[in-house]
Every structure is written in structure tokens, then in C-alpha cells.
Image: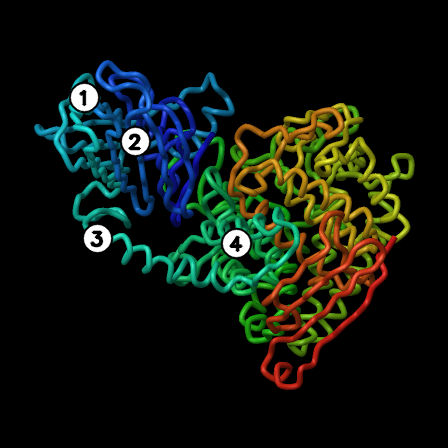
Amino acid sequence: MRMTINEDTTFLVSDELGDVPAGAELGLYQDDTRFLSRYELRLDGHLPLHLAARAIDHYAASHILTNPALTRAPRGELSIIRQRFVGHGMHEDLDLVNHGDRGAQFILDLRVDADFAHIFDVKQAIDVPDEAIHREGELTREQSAAGDRIHVRYRRGDLRRHLVVCFSAPSTIVDGQYRFDVSLAPREHWHLCIDFLTSGTTDDRPTYDCTRPQTAALADHREHWRTESVLRAPRLDTDSPLLQRAYTQSVEDYAALQIKAADISDGEFVLAAGIPWFMALFGRDSLIAAYQALPFYPLLAKGVLRALARLQGSRVDRLRAEEPGKILHEHRYGGHTERGNLIPAFPYYVTVDATPLFLIVLAAVYRLTGDLDFARALRDNAIQALEWMDQYGDRDGDGYLEYVREADVGLDNQGWKDSIDSVRFHDGVIARPPIALCEVQGYAYAARLGIADVFDALGEPERAAELRRAAATLKQRFNLDFWLPERGFYAEALDGGKRPVDALTSNVGQLLWTGIADQDKAQIVAERLLTPELFSGWGIRTMATSDAGYNPISYHNGSIWPHDNSLIVAGLARYGFMDAASQVVEGLLTALDQYPDHRLPELFAGYDRREIPFVVEYPTASRPQAWASGSIFLLLSVMLGVDADFSASPHRAQPFLPPGIERLRVDGIYLDGRPTTIDMRGSGTRLVRRIHDRSADDRRTGRGDRETLRKSS
């Protein structure tokens, strides 16, 4: 079991013992550099025994251990408690207690090492096991004569990295291990403080250490991380303990995944994509996660939009795929990678979908909050994004957004399924670029319609009318060019020869979310999405089992992604397919019930629920992942009938409750620019929903809205 804790861009991934074994992706990372690649505790050379491990906050964890049978300590006589706090390094309190009736003596060894590897190099070594991490620079280690300090330095050209490890007691150094001779009388306690300093100087301490009272430090950080993101979150009350716990966890995750990023966001918090691999600002991921939680966290969406606007493309740079008006794919804040074929430089702009998604979220924020000043502040960015779609995104002037990698290095596929083999024909052949993905055309359609309303509000009706005409033309052509009558589905994409890529994929489900699908075709798509070849019982697969490229444990060709399913659920509800939406929600919640922390992972395997009655984990899935945690927010919004309606779709979402839930109340969710209470109860064929505006006027008048609904079939 892996344990992950973080604060800002510092995070620790350890095993259940609290160890960081050598040769894995585990470690202490800061700004994408692994500062601690090995950290292991042994008693007389033996592994301790695991009792319990739990993250007690997003930045803190406790590991409760005991001893195996030792020469001078019977099995189970000792309590070993490792408590650690991350933040600009790490602090650990190590406490041992002898609960026995006689004295215990043993040697406690700590094995510590650092490789200063870039996180991309670590991930590449996992994905390609034969490629060990190779460091071309100079790595040196120094230790104090008393054995109470280790200083590891890394140098490569002008790059410098340091890790200083400080023990509160001296040790004996034997073969690179830091040895403490411990002798405990009955009931006696032994304590060791350990600081891991990532700055290279003892003057710059970790956020949490023994030189400052923990309570004061915790209170100071709660002011930012907890009060805003947790205590002010809308309150959920439901008869589903599972959904209640999952919501609480998602609120905690959104607090943990906010990073300060002062260099790009003027001190605001922005949303990182996930831990461990994506602890950075992303275009696509951060925008979708902000959209999912928009009625719960409208201010967070504004911060993401402002940060991305500041980094909007301004020139043509083929290496970084930058173009004027383009929204970035990924921006990281430090470190380097020795595998330059991954991502050449940051900010990195190689994404075809972040730019229309930027417009979608901007329009949704305006619709939800009515904040015209905010929309006006980003007006020029919106115009530049639209110009990018017309001039650069549409590479051949056919009205569709396409992509191709133009640099010698970087990502080949530039949609959300960005692995190298993710766009395949039904027979398994990989499509050749330039590629026009179906869901990206839906994003472009929804972006134009949504932002048209913003320009109307800004007093630019002619621009708004032109955007609506362009959207209508795109929808008409799309439903002709992408529809495959013989497959009863839309093509996943058009390849470089304008041939329809005919695999059955979940990309098509997102067309319902954006509203680009014709109603008659949407009905067929909804039915097809729920067939066994796509719906596993836990969720909708990224690729159908009938396609040659299907693999239930691939990253994008048969696995199940909760965020993808949440957008599909929103689309099913938008088109009025409430039973189908309810079925997918039930599958996701049943899968969620198998995770002890009630946290959906980035993805899980696509095995059929009828054949394997438990969820099969994807081995390197990020947890928490922003848009996986955000799925809970979006599912709640859809069930409550809250729809940002960015596409101006004629289909209006209806509320529903999936099987097993008969009460759902959210107090403080934003609707029409105000905090609102929505209370929904019912079962079977009838639901009663009450909506109460919490504004001062409505509290005085007692005005509320009560509606009784018959469940849609």
C-alpha cells in the first residue's frame, strides 16, 4: 500500500511502513525533483511489522509499527510510531516505547539516500524497467563526525541540488547506515527528530519541525488551506454514508491539490492535476477539474483561468508547441530531466483541447456567477483563444481542430488520451496525424456557443452572432462527417487522410456533454455506451471490448477513467437519458465503495464486473487526482439538476437519484450567482426537490422553490 501526503509542490510517497525502498517511484519530491530516493528503518536488520498507517491530513501521516522477534525484545513488545509532516522538506518524529516487563535492547538502523532525479525520469524508469535512472552529474555525500548530519550534493553544470538530513541524536555510521543503539527499560520512551532540508542549509527549515510549536504552524496553514477550501465548502447531507464520505474526501483532496504558484498566479491558489506525477498546473486537467467543481468552488475556477491567461501563448515556438492565443498543456516550476524526448521545455503547449476548454470554463463561470467584470478582464484572452482556434488549431482550413507533433521531441497525441497508441482504428491500426478528435470538435462547438453569451453581455452582439453561426455550421458538418451509420456511433477521430477512425471509444460519450450530437444520434450513442462492450458495470471503458486494440489494463485503450465517466453522465442527463445516467452513477459509486479512503483513483482496469466482482487497480494511477476527485462534485451537480449549460443546449437537465439513495441535500452550492440550498428526496417514480436562495432578501421573505418531479424514463 502506498501512502501519499503533500503540501504545495512538496510530496512524499512511501509504503505502509513509512519506508522509501530503493528502486521504486517512492520518495520525497519537491518542485519535480526527488530529494529522498531511499529511507528505510530496520531493527537489528529486520523489517518492523505494520499495524496501521493513515494520512491524518493532506500534509501529515502516522505509521504505527511493532517489532518482530528480536534477540533482546520479544515480538510485539515495542510501539514504533513514525509521524511525518511535509512542506518545504519534511520533518519526522520517531517514537519507540517498550511495553514489556523487561528491558529491550536493539540496534535501530536508518538507511538514507538521494538521487535528485527528475520526476519524469523516475516515471520513465517505471514504464520502461530496463532503463535505469542514469545521473550524468556529480553526486557527493558528507556526514558529520558525530553522525547527526548528512549532506548530499548534486551538481550538473549550473544546476545544484542539496539534501541535508539532521538527527536530534548522534549515530554510529556503518556501511552507509546510521545506527542508533537503543536500550529501553520497561515503559521507557525513546524519541528521535529527523529533519530533511531540501534547501541545503539548516537556516531554512521545513515548514513543520520541532523548533516551532506544531499547533501554531498548523493554524497558520489552515488559514489558507483549510478555511477557504474545507470549512467554506458547501455542506452535504445524504442517507448514503458512502457518498457522504466520498464528498468529504474530495473536499480534502481539492484543498491538498491547490498550489500557491505565486510566480504565475499573483499569489492565488491554482489547482494541480494530481499526485505523484502531475503536481503542477495543467491546462486540460486543471480546467476540467475546475469545471467539475464550479458550483462548489467558483473562486478556484477563476484562479485557474487567470493563471492560464497569464501564460497564454504569444509567439510561434515549435519546440514548445507555443502559438499565439494557445493555452498551455503543462507548466512546472523546477528541476530538469535527462530524457529530453519527453517534454523539451516549460511552459509546454502541446495540447489541442485546453484552448476551447478555457473558453468553456470562462463562459460557465460567467453563467454561474454573473461576474461581468471578471469576464471583461479576460475578454482579450478569449479573443486570442478564438483566433488560435481559427488560425492555428484548424491546420488545413476544413473547420476542425487538428494536431500533429512538429518538433522532434514531445507528445505525439495531444488530446486527453495522450499515450502514443491511444487513437486506433477498429482493427487496431494506429491512426496517423494530423488527427481531428471527435470530442475536441465538441469542445470547439461548446466554446463558441458559451463565449457568445459572454460577448452579448459585454455589448458585442455582432461577434456573438458570428460565433453562434460558426457553431451551428460546425455542428451540422460534424454530424455528417463523423457519424458512422454502420457502427451506430461517431468516429473517434478523422486521421490525416480524413478517414474516420472507427473504434468504439468513450470519447464519443463526451459529445453529449458538449451538446454537439444530433438528438436522434445521441439516443443511439446513449444506448451503445451502456452495452457490455463499453460499460463494464463499474463504468464506461475508454475502448470497447470488440475493438482489436482493447486492453483492460492499458492506460487509454480499455481502462475506466472516473472523470471521463462524470462528463458522460453530465451529457446523458443533459439529453434527458436519466436512467442511463443513473446506471453509470451506480456503477461508479459501487466501485468507489471498494476503496477504503473513499477516493476515486485516476483510472482503474476495465475488467467486467460480472466476471471479476472487484475493482482491479491500475498500478501507477495517481491518487489523489484532481479530476477523479472532481467527479464526485460533478456527479452531485448532475443528480441535483444543476447544469452550467455552457453549450446553450435545448436539453435541460433533470434531477435524479440513483438506486440506494433517497435523500440528498447540499447547503451552499452556487446557483444563479448565489449560495443556494437544494434538498431532494424521493424514491421510485417520484422526487421532490426544494431550492432555497440563501441571499438576505430571500431569508426575509422566505421565498423558495418547490417542485415535484416524475422520474424520467
Labels 3 & 4 near each other (Cβ < 8 A): no
Answer few, some or many: residues within 10 Å of disc 2's Cα (few below 14, many 20 plus, some between 14 and 19): many
Disc sitting over residue 251 in the figure: 4
- Mark 3 or mark 4, earlier in chain: 3
Residue beneath disc 2: 80
Residue wearing tag 3: 212
In the image, 152 versus 252, the foreground residue is 252
Identity of the residue drawn at 75% across and 39% down: 493
Q: Earlier in the sequence, mark 1 or mark 4?
A: 1
Q: Earlier in the sequence, mark 2 or mark 1?
A: 2
Badge 3 local density, few (<14 within 10 Å), some, or many (20+)? few
**Dot 1 or dot 3, earlier in sequence:** 1
Q: On the image, numbered disc 1 is attached to which residue? A: 105
Element type where label 1 sits in the image: strand
Q: Position of residue 472 (x, y in %)?
A: 81, 60
Find the residue positioned furthest to the top. 71
Q: Earlier in the sequence, mark 4 or mark 2?
A: 2
